[in-house]
Image (spheres, rainbow, N blue to C red):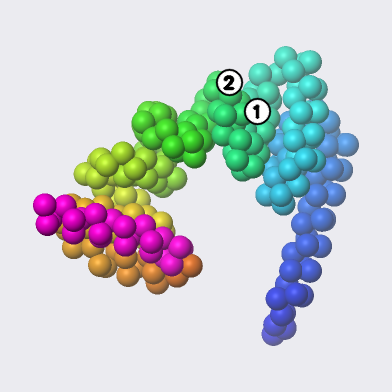
Amino acid sequence: MIVMNNEEFQAKQKRETEKLVHKLIRAIDEHPEKVNNYYDLGSLLTRLNDYQQAEELFMKALGIFEAKGDQGAIDLLNYGLGNLYYEVGKPNAAIKLYDKIGDPKIKADSYLMLAQSYMKKGQHKQAVAYGVTAHELRPADPEINQVLGDSLLALGEFTAAKKYYDAILKRHPGRADTQFNRGIVAMVLGEPYHDYLTQAQQLDPAYYKKSEQRLAEIEKTLQATKKK
């Protein structure tokens, strides 16, 4: 068995990614009428942090499919471009694009991204409204349940947040963010909470360390409230 070191592994990943980029470019050249080729390449460039090229590609593709009046293709490209704007910290631009989407195949995804965009803006009531709509379409989706739990937690609706976190943990106990936030909810509600926090720490020590300050602040607030 050949074991690669980190540099070799990264070099291999880079070669494979470049191959995939070239494959998608070739697919667009051969089948310029297929919207998925543009969407897949734009999404890959976004994941590679090549935001300028991704934006140019999405805009070019939108021009092509708007001229054809292909609303399904336009919706998919708006979703991809919206994800790019969300990724680069432009939630207002992302929201405008997600709001335009009518395709039922990606409606739940667009509502989820609207909820996440409003969360990013700190507008948690709007995030809950869109999260609930997404939840009606896909109640078992852990990402939808997470955004609802996190938004309700931010609003101080701890009992409501608990319901969504518990729904996730039944099927996905390996999520450190869910375990951590469920621990916070348990702490505030006066329930046993150490097991949730221990799980979060074991699953993702870096995430736990980053979130420790938040935990300390909540403990301090709770102690002050008890004294009063």
Q: Residue at x 77, y 68 (%)?
A: 12
Q: In which quadrant of the rendered view does residue 63 lie?
A: top right
- Give the residue displayed 80% in from the left and 44% down from the top: 24
On screen, residue 135 versus residue 79, left or right, reads left
Amino acid type indicated by mark 2: Lys
Total count of labels: 2
Question: Who is closer to the viewer here, 18 or 215?
Answer: 215
In what element is the residue under mark 2? loop
Residue 46 x, y percent position in the rendering: 70, 45
Q: Earlier in the sequence, mark 1 or mark 2?
A: 1
**What's the residue type where badge 1 is placed?**
Asn
Question: Magenta part of the protein: which range?
Answer: 207-228
Residue drawn 71% across the image and 36% down it: 39
132 to 63, vertically: above or below:
below
Answer yes or no: is residue 156 visible. yes
**Residue 194 image position (x, y, % from top left):** 25, 67
From the image, give the main secondary structure of the stretch colored magenta. helix
Callout 2 crowding tier (Cα within 10 Å): few <14, some 14–19, many ≥20: few
Query: Is disc 1 placed on a helix, strand or loop?
Result: helix
* Number of the label disc, if any, that sits on residue 90: none
Residue labelled with disc 1: 78
Residue 20 % position (x, y): 78, 52
Front residue of this view, candidates 130 and 139:
130
Relative to residue 152, is residue 36 drawn left or right?
right
Q: Nearer the viewer, residue 84 or 163?
A: 84
* Disc 2: which residue: 100
Relative image position of residue 181 (x, y in whole percent):
34, 54
Question: Is label 1 in contact with label 2 (beta carbons under 8 Å)?
Answer: yes
Residue 101 appears in the rendering: no
